[in-house]
Every structure is written in C-alpha cells, then in structure tokens.
Amino acid sequence: MDYNTDIVDAPIHEPNSDYHYSEGSYFPPQFKIVAVFLAIAGLLLCINLNLIGFVLLPLSIAVLFAKKELTISFSLSKYRHAIKIFKFKFGAWEPMPKVEYISLFSGKKRQDVAVGPMTTSTAYNEMEVNLVYNKSKRLTVFETSDFAKAFRIAQSFATQLDLKIYDATKHEGEWLT
C-alpha cells in the first residue's frame, strides 16, 4: 500500500531547518474591498440567524486574511507554494529541483491603479533572490528593495545548498562566491 503522509509526520523532518517566506496577500485589493462588504452582510445575516450569513462570514474572512507563502524543507528536499489563512496552510509539497546556482536579479516593477477615469502608475525597483535550475527556470525565494538584505538571504542559501551566487543586478553580471 502507498500511504501519503504529510511532511510534518515524516520521521526525519527537522522543522527548525525550514525556510518560510510570506509573499504578501493572496488576493488583490479589489477582492478585499468586496470581502469587507460580504463580511458586513454576513454578520447582519448571522444576527438574523440566516444560514447564508454563516457561509459568507468565514468566506470573507478567508479572503481578507489569505497570504501566499513559500516553504522549503531542507531536511526533506521539498518545497511548496501555499495559501496561508491564519495557521492553516493549503498547498502540495513538490520535490526540490537540482539547483544549479543562486541569482540576484534587479528589475523595475510597475503598478497601475485605476479609479473610474483616473489612472496613476507607480514604478519601483525590486531585488529577487532566485534558485535557478534546469539552466533557466527560477524559484523566487525572496523579494525586497534592499540589496544588502537580498545578499544576506542569497548567502544563507549559498551556504545551505553549497552553491555560487550570480549577481545579475548590474549590466555585466558577475559571480560573487
């Protein structure tokens, strides 16, 4: 028989060696605004003991508090992208690919916001720490606007996985370790 066990139940799992990165909210702000109205409607329906309110209220709370999280288990060589709602995590574990090197990448990102006929745009620089495998595939493990912080995270992964760091933040990339 083939038993599927959760990673927490594995006998050699060392939770202290896990890497967790919360990537921010799972849903965009528009969904959160709708969720606030659904929470109010759900609360009012719950007060009147309407069963729809008992469905709307937890659903809206889930939308408001859902976050994206990346977890890497070094002891079991697995990772997962999960949706985290409070302490509950939903996502399948996948085997860790054979990582070739760690990449520091800087890029301009842009966010457009439109309200009716008015639109505005904000541009900002963001650093990514990526685990590169299969020559060009990337697993982004950290994002920040601070180069020093990104470099510290990359160094910790380089030490843990015994890999080199490629700095692609400049026009001419260079190997750092």
Image (spheres, helix red, strand yellow):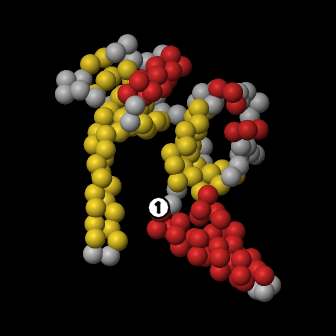
Nearest to the observer: residue 44 or residue 142: 44
Percent coordinates x, y for residue 125 in the rendering: 31, 40
Q: Which of the 4 image quarters holds residue 13?
A: top right
Q: Is residue 135 above or below residue 28?
A: above
Estimate how packed mark 1 is, as few (under 14), some (14 to 19) or many (20 or more) residues with alpha carbons within 10 Å. Answer: few
Residue 8 location, quadrant:
top right
| Spot occupied by residue 12 in the image (x, y as percentages of width and height) | 73, 27
| Image vertical order of residue 64 relative to residue 101, above or below | below
Secondary element under disc 1, as helix, strand or loop, is loop
**Residue at the outermost left position:** 171
Q: Is residue 150 above or below residue 113?
A: above
Q: Amino acid at mark 1?
A: Pro
Compared across the picture, whether 130 is left or right of 4 comes to: left
Which of the 4 image quadrants contains residue 94?
Answer: top right
Image quarter of the C terminus: top left
- Where is residue 146 shown, x and y percent of the image? 40, 31
Give the vertical position of 21 relative to 170 (above or below).
below
Q: Residue at x 39, y 17 (%)?
A: 164
Q: Is residue 49 left or right of residue 36?
A: right
Residue assigned mark 1:
28
Looking at the picture, tell me which residue is in the foreground, 136 or 4.
136
User: From this viewpoint, is residue 130 visible?
Assistant: no
Q: Residue at x 59, y 36 (%)?
A: 20
- Residue 23 seen anywhere in this rendered image of the structure: yes
